[in-house]
Amino acid sequence: MSGHSKWSTIKRKKGAADAKRSKIFSKIIKDITIAVKESGSDPDGNPRLRLAISNAKGASMPKDTIQRAINKGCDKDAANFQETTYEGYAPHGIAIFIESTTDNLQRTVSNIRSIFNKFGGNLGTNGSLSFLFDRKGIFTIPKGELDEEEFELEMIDAGAEDIVLEDDFFSVTTAMEDFGSMMKKLEEMNIEPENAELQRIPNDTIKLNIETARKILKIIEHFEEDDDVQNVFHNLEITDELMAEI
């Protein structure tokens, strides 16, 4: 399995676990709210909102919850969320890139710095780790009744760099600049992805022994459990043994 597809598989499996504790719902609600505040409540004229609603449906979010999030975005008195990123190192040189959506920057940076410090890491300056990650479009698509060969040809035509079928899901990777054209292609094919997002894929990974790697995963979980954190990316190599635990 390629590095890109392995990462997307991990994100999908973790997404399923997150859904059980409603974490993924809060992430999507923030995405919808920000999209509405940025470009209005009409999905036809707001590609970001259309994507957020698609992800909400993929996560089985109830329609009334989606509508409440849209209404919240229309409310001028509702909290204004800001999108921020944080970069730093966990022990053993593991790079960690955090994306957050917050209505209180001071609280968020304080929480993130506290987690780094608590576990022997350090928060760096923005841009210090960007060279370690490539931004890629990752699409998770249920196979359903799709013809594998025909589907792959359509995806390649739309700019897919990597296509993997695992557990009855296609994982399709694109360059960041091809993300929009891939979304358009899927819409033309009447295919609704379970999830579609830009992810930060590590260029190289660091392999640690299983016990040390488990400790790093615990640190990552602490970041992910923070209410302001949307995504956490890292360059820890995920071995088959670690995959089994995830």
Image (spheres, grey):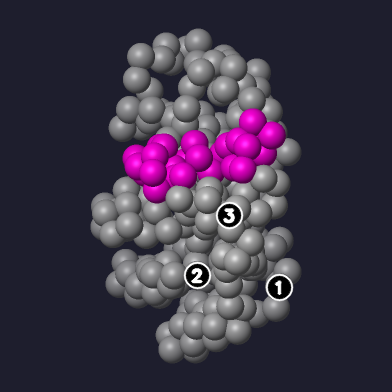
Is the residue marked by circle 2 packed among few (<14), some (14-19), or many (20+) residues within 10 Å?
many
Per the model, the C-alpha gap separating discs 2 and 3 is 17 Å
> Which quadrant: the N terminus?
top left
**Against 118, is 42 above or below?**
above
Residue type at numbered disc 1 = Asn
Q: SS class of the residue under badge 1?
A: loop
Instruction: Tell me: residue 1, above or below residue 219.
Output: above
19 or 76: nearer the eye? 76
> In this image, 201 relative to 24: left or right?
right
Find numbered disc 2 in the image and state the secondary structure of the residue it sits on: loop
Q: Residue at x 47, y 27 (%)?
A: 192
Q: Which residue is mark 3?
A: 73
Residue at position x 43%, y 89% in the image: 118
Residue type for callout 2: Asp
Mark-to-mark CA distance, 1 and 3? 28 Å
What residue is disc 1 on? 126
Which residues fall within the magenta stretch?
41-67
State the SS at label 3.
helix
Select label 2 or label 1 by which is in front: 2
Q: Report the label total.
A: 3
Label 2 to label 1, Cα distance in Å? Answer: 17 Å
Task: Compare marks 1 and 3 and give the one earlier in the sequence.
Answer: 3
Taking the spot 70% from the left edge, 46% from the top edge, the residue there is 39
Residue sitting nearer the eye, 119 or 54: 54
Frontmost of labels 2 and 3 is: 3
**Above or below for 221 versus 203:** below
Q: Is residue 61 visible?
A: yes
Q: Main secondary structure of the magenta part?
A: helix
Image coords of residue 35 (percent x, y): 62, 49
